[in-house]
C-alpha cells in the first residue's frame, strides 16, 4: 500500500507531467482557454491513461519488446476512440471545442511515455497508481491554467452554458491572456508555485518500501 501511495502522489506533484516532466504542453496550451474544455480534456486523459496502464501492465509478459510501441498505440487508440465517440454523442459542444486534440491523445507524450517508461515494467497495482496520479496531476494543472486564463482574459467563467463567475462591467480583460504569450506567462508562474510546493513537501511524502524498489526500465 505504501508503494501505491508513493507512486500515486509522485504523479500528482513530484513528477507532475506538466510542471516537472514538461510533456503534453501542446494540448495544454491549446485547450486551456476555457475551463469546461480543460476539465473534459483532463478527464479524457485520466480515463485513457488509467485504462491503458492496466492493459499494458496486464499483458507485458506477452508482448515482445520489438513490437511493444505498436501494441501500445493500438491499446491507447482504442480508449481514445471511446472518449471521442462519447463526447461526440453526449457533449457535442465540448467535442467541437476540443477538436483534433482528442484524437491526438493517441500520440500524447504523457500516455505513450508512461506506458513505455512505467506500465510495461511494473505490476498492475503500481501501473494503476501511476496512471491515476499522472492523469490527476495533468488535470489539476490544466484546469487551474484554464480558470486563470478564462476568468482574467474574458472576465467570466462559463461552464456548460452557465456563468459561474462574472467580473464587474468596469473590468477590461486583457485579451493577451487568451493567446499563447499569455498562456506561457501564466504557466511559468504555475511552474514556480509547483516547484516551491515540491520543495516544501517532498520530505514529507510517503516513500516506497526499500525492500520493493520501483525502477523504471527494469522488469
Image (cartoon, grey):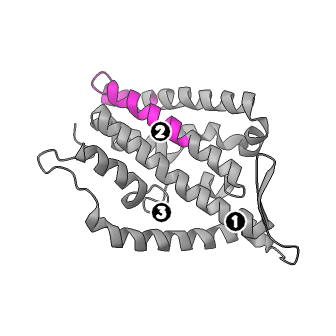
Which quarter of the rendering shows the N terminus? top left
Q: Is residue 179 visible?
A: no
In magenta segment, residue 179: no
Stretch in magenta: 45-70
Res 145 → quadrant: bottom right
Residue at numbered disc 1: 149
Residue at numbered disc 3: 19
Q: Secondary structure at mark 2?
A: helix
Label 2 to label 1, Cα distance in Å? Answer: 26 Å
Q: Position of residue 20 (x, y in %)?
A: 43, 62
In magenta segment, residue 54: yes
Q: Residue furthest right?
A: 169
Residue at left offset 73%, top offset 65% = 151
Residue at left offset 40%, top offset 34% = 53
- Label placed on residue 25: none
Q: Earlier in the sequence, mark 3 or mark 2?
A: 3
Residue at left offset 37%, top offset 68% = 198
Tell whether 21 sits left or right of 27: left
Front residue of 134/5: it is 5
Label 3 to label 1, Cα distance in Å? Answer: 17 Å
Res 119 → quadrant: top left
Q: Position of residue 95 (x, y in %)?
A: 73, 38
Which quarter of the rendering shows the C terminus? top left
Q: Is residue 144 visible?
A: yes
Is residue 167 shown above or below 23? below
Label 3 to label 2, Cα distance in Å? Answer: 18 Å
The mark lying in front, picked from 3 and 1, is 1
Res 206 → quadrant: bottom left
Amino acid at each position: 500500500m505504501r508503494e501505491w501511495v508513493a507512486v500515486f502522489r509522485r504523479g500528482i506533484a513530484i513528477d507532475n507531467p506538466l510542471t516537472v516532466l514538461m510533456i503534453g504542453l501542446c494540448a495544454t496550451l491549446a485547450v486551456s482557454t476555457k475551463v469546461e474544455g480543460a476539465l473534459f480534456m483532463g478527464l479524457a486523459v485520466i480515463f485513457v491513461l488509467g485504462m491503458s496502464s492496466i492493459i499494458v501492465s496486464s499483458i507485458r509478459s506477452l508482448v515482445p519488446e520489438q513490437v511493444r510501441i505498436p501494441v501500445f498505440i493500438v491499446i491507447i487508440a482504442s480508449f481514445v476512440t471511446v472518449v471521442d465517440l462519447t463526447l461526440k454523442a453526449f457533449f457535442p459542444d465540448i467535442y467541437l471545442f476540443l477538436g483534433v486534440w482528442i484524437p491526438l491523445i493517441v500520440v500524447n507524450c504523457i500516455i505513450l511515455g508512461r506506458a513505455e517508461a512505467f506500465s510495461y515494467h511494473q505490476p498492475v497495482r503500481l501501473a494503476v497508481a501511476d496512471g491515476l496520479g499522472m492523469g490527476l496531476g495533468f488535470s489539476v494543472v490544466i484546469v487551474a491554467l484554464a480558470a486563470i486564463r478564462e476568468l482574467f482574459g474574458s472576465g467570466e467563467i462559463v461552464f456548460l452554458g452557465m456563468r459561474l463567475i462574472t467580473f464587474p462591467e468596469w473590468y477590461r480583460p486583457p485579451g493577451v491572456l487568451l493567446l499563447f504569450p499569455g498562456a506561457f506567462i501564466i504557466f511559468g508562474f504555475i511552474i514556480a508555485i509547483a516547484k516551491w510546493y515540491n520543495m516544501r513537501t517532498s520530505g514529507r511524502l510517503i516513500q516506497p518500501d526499500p525492500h520493493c524498489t520501483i525502477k523504471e526500465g527494469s522488469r
